[in-house]
Image: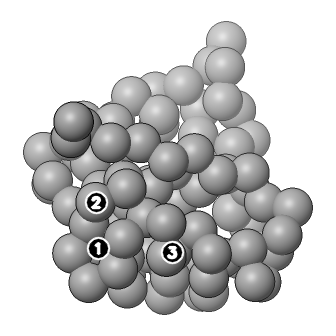
Amino acid sequence: HPQLLGFQILFAEDDRLIASSIREELVKEGAKVWIAHDGEEAIEVFKSNRDQINLVILDVKMPKKSGLIVMKKIKEVNAELRMILVSGHE
């Protein structure tokens, strides 16, 4: 059975192809996924769904606000929320 059943994930990634393919894989595993394509959108999506999201995955380098800034803003609202920072850059 799906490994992520019940997980509600905010995934922030500015590369639309990567965001789409990762979302597809997460959904196959049973997760509900919200996608944001820049840091500001990630904060807005989080604010609108904060009571449902239980995991946030953030690209470190995104337009408008970096993943680190987004992480700090989300931590101000929910210090206990699990977050993962990822980067495809060296």
The quarter of the picture where residue 23 lies is top left
Q: Amino acid at mark 2?
A: Lys
Q: Nearer the viewer, residue 8 or 55?
A: 55
Residue at 36% of width from left, 53% of height from top?
Answer: 59
Q: Nearer the viewer, mark 2 or mark 1?
A: 2
Indicate which disc, 2 or 1, sits on the residue closer to the N terminus: 1
Q: Amino acid at mark 3?
A: Val
Write down the residue under mark 1.
38
Indicate which disc, 3 or 2, sits on the residue closer to the N terminus: 2
Q: Nearer the viewer, residue 72 or 80?
A: 72
Residue at 26% of width from left, 66% of height from top?
Answer: 62
The quarter of the picture where residue 46 lies is bottom right
Q: Quadrant of the C terminus?
A: top left
Residue 70 badge: 3
Q: Amino acid at mark 1?
A: Asp
Image-based side of 72 in relation to 69, left or right: right
Residue at 50% of width from left, 82% of height from top?
Answer: 43
The type of colouring in the image is: one colour
Q: Is residue 6 above or below residue 74?
A: above
Write down the residue under mark 2.
61
Q: Is residue 9 visible?
A: no
Report the Cα–Cα distance between label 3 and label 2. 11 Å
Q: Nearer the viewer, residue 77 or 19?
A: 77
Callout 2 environment at 10 Å: few (<14), some (14 to 19), or many (20+)? some
Residue 16 badge: none
Callout 3 environment at 10 Å: few (<14), some (14 to 19), or many (20+)? many
